[in-house]
């Protein structure tokens, strides 16, 4: 560690006990040993750090806001690289609707910056207050408006990655396979050029409650045919009851039109706030483990029915089939859920990533792709060892 | 509002509050974020970090479950354990010796530093 300490300004590195404890876990609360934390400010800082890690055989763990829910940013006898000081926001290329930002820029900060220009970055995970652009790219984040805007990989024009050999890559839309969704195993994303879109002129939303799941899924299909649909969130009766709402199958549908019943900004904000508080409230209610399967439309009725019969609280982005069933730690039904999802052609991780939590369930295809990327970008295994698969 | 903001002693460590914290904005290190403090507090660590909180409660306002960082309680624990910053010690010594937190002052002299915790 002495050698590492000598490579950085004392403000840019910490081996203090307090720092190492605070960085020992992400929002999944899966914890591990953090040896040190480095706050790079330049590409040269990164290259020095990578050189040291390659020489000494240490593991480097990229970290954004640490809102990840699968232990992707959890160190395992590792040095954590915190992107918190990579916060520059470049000027907006108005004709092209593009902007270049550093990886540590939090999403809400970016969107506040864009608001006066009537533009926004539309990939919005529930963690938007803190989640960083780098962390979102590394997990290929989806989120609250994925039904309209898809995942972040569709919005990255170019990303700058420093790989495990210390080589700088400017990966464009065509060759960004080494970045989006690879959870920091290929290197550290330091900057990205992002596509932007106009803030919608109109917005409204509707809350719909159903006793019967089949009827609700018919309404889902109907709502998805509306071209102005911009969010379609689901809350099951168990989750609704746990947070004090009517125990029904509930849909929150948002439109970029006046098709919804709630039009006042203040009322819409209150409904969204309530929806976004669900995750923390279900943790408090005794269900801290958040799963994130993506379920094909044809399997949604049987899966949601099984979850409801089991009494498992669920909410999520049903518009794109990503749901968040909540469990107690070690609940054997988590494995049953994985089997059901895989057997019906779905993905066991729809948006949070595999991290440490799900690595043993990575598919063969994912393992083969990850191995090929490791060989290309990080043959010495400097970055995020033992993650993803 | 569908959900009332509750005062809540439990932190779920989601990290949604860190950008609201003025101290985190300056330090940009997790141990100075509300979540970092909660992690340190739950690990039973007594640290000077707890003095670096403005007690503004911005974190509680943005927290989806209204977690209260209990800054005063954490500090009270430090004082009980006689853990003080040098500034803190100087202030108390000055009050004891000179009857003011600034130290010796000539008649009409304006203090140049405000020594505080
Ligand atoms: C309340 C709550 C709601 C959430 N809602 C959603 C949601 O709706 N949709 C969704 O997709 N996710 C959601 N998440 C999960 C999480 O917020 C996202 O995965 C987010 O994109 C992570 O960003 P972060 O900056 O916190 O990354 P971190 O948690 O710090 O890191 C996540 C992963 O990315 C890697 N990484 C981070 N920064 C970099 C970088 N600069 N270069 C390379 N690798 C990097 C890390 O090593 C790790 O593997 C939610 C989490 C919470 C707590
Ligand atoms: S009360 Fe303390 S921890 Fe919370 S936001 Fe204010 S300074 Fe930060
Ligand atoms: S204080 Fe609230 S918002 Fe902050 S990490 Fe804890 S639960 Fe999340």
Image (cartoon, coloured by chain):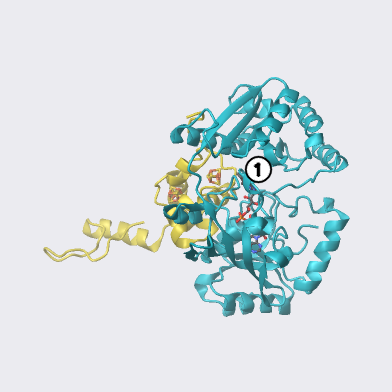
Judged left or right of residue A114, residue A278 is: right
Judged left or right of residue A21, residue A199 is: left
Q: Is residue A67 visible?
A: yes
Q: How many marks?
A: 1
- Assign the C terminus of chain A to one quadrant of the image: bottom right
Residue A193 placement: quadrant: bottom right
Q: Position of residue A79 (x, y in %)?
A: 65, 67
Q: Residues within 10 Å of mark 1 (few under 14, many from 20)?
A: many
Residue B61 placement: quadrant: top left
Q: Position of residue A318 (x, y in %)?
A: 69, 37
For the point 36% across and 56% down, the residue is: B117
* Depth check, front residue: A249 or A33: A249
* Depth check, front residue: A306 or A317: A317
Judged left or right of residue B83, residue A240 is: right
Q: Give the colour chain B carries in the figure.
A: yellow
Q: Position of residue A92 (x, y in %)?
A: 48, 63
**What is the chain letter for disc 1?**
A
Judged left or right of residue A303, residue A288 is: left
For mark 1, give the secondary structure.
Answer: helix
Establish if B105 lies above or below A5: above
Residue A191 placement: quadrant: bottom right
Q: Position of residue A152 (x, y in %)?
A: 64, 55
Q: Say which residue label 1 marks.
A: A147
User: Is label 1's Cβ within 8 Å of ligand 1?
Assistant: no
Q: Residue furthest top?
A: A211
- Assign the N terminus of chain A to one quadrant of the image: bottom right
Q: Give the colour chain A carries in the figure.
A: cyan
Establish if A260 lies above or below A357: above
């Amino acid at each position: 560690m002495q050698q590492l300490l000598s490579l950085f300004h004392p403000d840019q590195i910490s081996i203090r006990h307090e720092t190492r404890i605070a960085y020992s876990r992400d929002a999944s609360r899966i914890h591990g040993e953090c040896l040190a934390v480095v706050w790079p400010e330049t590409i040269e800082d990164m290259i020095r750090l990578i050189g040291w890690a390659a020489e000494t055989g240490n593991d480097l763990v990229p970290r954004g806001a640490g809102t990840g829910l699968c232990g992707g940013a959890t160190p395992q006898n590792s040095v954590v690289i915190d992107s918190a000081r990579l916060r520059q926001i470049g000027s907006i290329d108005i004709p092209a609707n593009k902007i270049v930002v550093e990886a540590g820029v939090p999403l809400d900060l970016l969107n506040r910056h864009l608001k006066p220009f009537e533009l926004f970055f539309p990939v919005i995970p529930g963690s938007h207050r803190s989640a960083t652009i780098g962390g979102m790219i590394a997990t290929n984040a989806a989120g609250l408006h994925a039904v309209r805007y898809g995942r972040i990989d569709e919005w990255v024009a170019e990303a700058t990655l420093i790989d495990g050999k210390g080589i700088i890559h400017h990966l464009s839309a065509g060759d960004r396979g080494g970045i989006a969704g690879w959870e920091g195993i290929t290197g550290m994303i330091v900057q990205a050029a992002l596509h932007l879109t106009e803030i919608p002129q109109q917005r409204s939303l509707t809350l719909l409650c159903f006793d019967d799941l089949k009827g609700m899924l018919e309404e889902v299909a109907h709502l998805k045919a509306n071209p102005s649909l911009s969010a379609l969130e689901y809350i099951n009766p168990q989750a609704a009851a746990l947070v004090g709402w009517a125990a029904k199958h509930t849909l929150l549908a948002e439109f970029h039109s006046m098709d919804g019943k709630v039009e006042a900004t203040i009322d819409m904000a209150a409904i969204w706030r309530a929806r976004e508080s669900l995750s923390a409230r279900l943790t408090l209610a005794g269900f801290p483990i958040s799963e994130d399967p993506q379920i094909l439309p044809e399997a949604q009725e049987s899966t949601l029915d099984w979850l409801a019969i089991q009494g498992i609280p669920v909410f999520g982005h049903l518009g794109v089939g990503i749901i968040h069933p909540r469990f107690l730690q070690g609940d054997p039904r988590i494995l049953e859920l994985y089997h059901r999802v895989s057997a019906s052609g779905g993905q066991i991780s729809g948006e949070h990533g595999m991290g440490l939590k799900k690595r043993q369930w990575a598919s063969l295809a994912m393992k083969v792709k990850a191995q090929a990327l490791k060989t290309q970008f990080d043959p010495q295994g400097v970055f995020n060892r033992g993650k993803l698969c | 509002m569908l959900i009332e903001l509750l005062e809540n002693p439990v932190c779920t460590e989601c990290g949604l509050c860190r950008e609201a914290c003025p101290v985190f904005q300056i330090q940009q290190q997790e141990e100075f974020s509300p979540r970092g403090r909660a992690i340190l507090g739950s690990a039973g660590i007594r640290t000077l970090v707890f003095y670096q909180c403005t007690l503004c409660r911005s974190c509680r306002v943005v927290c989806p479950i209204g977690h209260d960082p209990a800054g005063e309680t954490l500090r009270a624990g430090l004082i009980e354990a006689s853990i003080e910053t040098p500034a803190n010690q100087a202030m108390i010594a000055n009050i004891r010796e000179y009857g003011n937190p600034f130290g010796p002052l000539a008649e009409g002299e304006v203090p140049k530093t405000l020594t505080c915790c």
